[in-house]
Amino acid sequence: MTAQLIDGNALSQKLRLDVATRTTALKARGVTPGLAVVLVGDSPASAVYVRNKVKACADAGLHSVLEKYDADLTEAALLARVEALNNDPAIHGILVQLPLPAHINAQKVIEAISPAKDVDGFHIASAGALMTGATGFLPCTPYGCMQMLDSIGFDLRGKHAVVIGRSNIVGKPMAMLLLQKNATVTICHSATANLKAMTLQADVIVAAVGKRNVLTADMVKPGAVVIDVGMNRDDAGKLCGDVDFAGVQTVASHITPVPGGVGPMTITMLLVNTLEAAERAAA
Ligand code: GUN
């Protein structure tokens, strides 16, 4: 079997077209969705990520501002900027790029963002909303993974989903979203005794660890769907995921590539959340 690719670029293009259409409709009512992206420090990787986010906003017709600060910005100054953005009517979504410098308490900064503008879905109010089924914002990466499963018409009801990784940003919210769709969910992590025994039972596997070759062909049930959230470099410096793509694609029914899989979907769902925030503010 050779797995079918779930193409994150193609799906993103389709969803971003819808964002652009809804943005045009909102603009006709006098509201331009606006995203503020805050970057502290000079990490080259973070600089690339935020540039891509701001460019995606412009391409879809959203307003965006990029605020860049030196690595020695104080926590108090950053909190003051967040408060100003909370009160700025032109801004509907606020994203503070992580990681922040060590002297800044990232969780404190995230909790300072108004839940109504928490388009990253990292605020405790958003996490609580996801846990209880209330309205909030979904973290962009797991939200994008769910869209990818939806795009192949995969019905999760009664299926066994295995999530590898338990981060607050991906693993835990991913498990909640799969549960919401009536999957039976197992969360595996670094202390899981026998990962292969778990993944071999899975109809869907989401790998979100940040380590190469966490999932190999011998660990996958024939016909399973595999979503690769990882962003790593191989020995040749080439971008790769957490999944041994060459091996697993011979066993899985569907698989997301890296690059061109979950990555573009994360940015797309940020646009969706920002538009949604603006639509809610305008309602
Ligand atoms: N750093 C890496 N990914 C993300 C993300 O999705 N949001 C934020 N705020 N920081 C990140």
Image: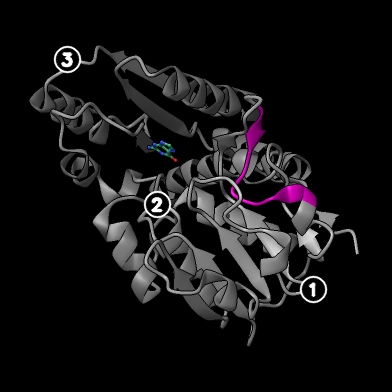
Check disc 3 and give the amino acid type: Asp
Identify which residue, 130 or 91, lies in the foreground: 130
Total residue callouts: 3
Quarter of the picture containing the N terminus is bottom right
- Residue 130 vs 42, above or below: the answer is below
Q: Label 1 vs label 3: CA separation?
A: 51 Å
The residues colored magenta run 238-246
Q: Residues within 10 Å of mark 1 (few under 14, many from 20)?
A: some
Q: Specify the amino acid type for callout 1.
A: Pro
Is residue 6 something that shows in the picture? no
The residue identified by callout 3 is 72
Q: How is the image coloured?
A: one colour
Tell me where residue 39 sits by quadrant. top left
Residue drawn at (82%, 66%), measured in percent from left and top?
A: 253
Q: Disc 2, ligand 1: is the CB inside 8 Å?
A: yes
Question: As displayed, is residue 75 above or below residue 260?
Answer: above
Point out residue 35 in the picture as x, y percentages from the top left corner.
43, 31
Q: Which mark is residue 169?
A: 2
1 or 2: mark nearer the eye? 1
Q: Is residue 242 magenta?
A: yes
Q: Residue furthest left?
A: 76
- Mark 1 vs mark 3: give the one in front: 1
Side of 65 where 164 appears, left or right: right
Instruction: Find numbered disc 1 in the image and state the secondary structure of the residue it sits on.
Output: loop
158 displayed left or right of 83: right
Residue under pointer 1: 222
Residue at 35% across, 71% down: 131
Query: Mark 1 or 3 closer to N-term?
Result: 3
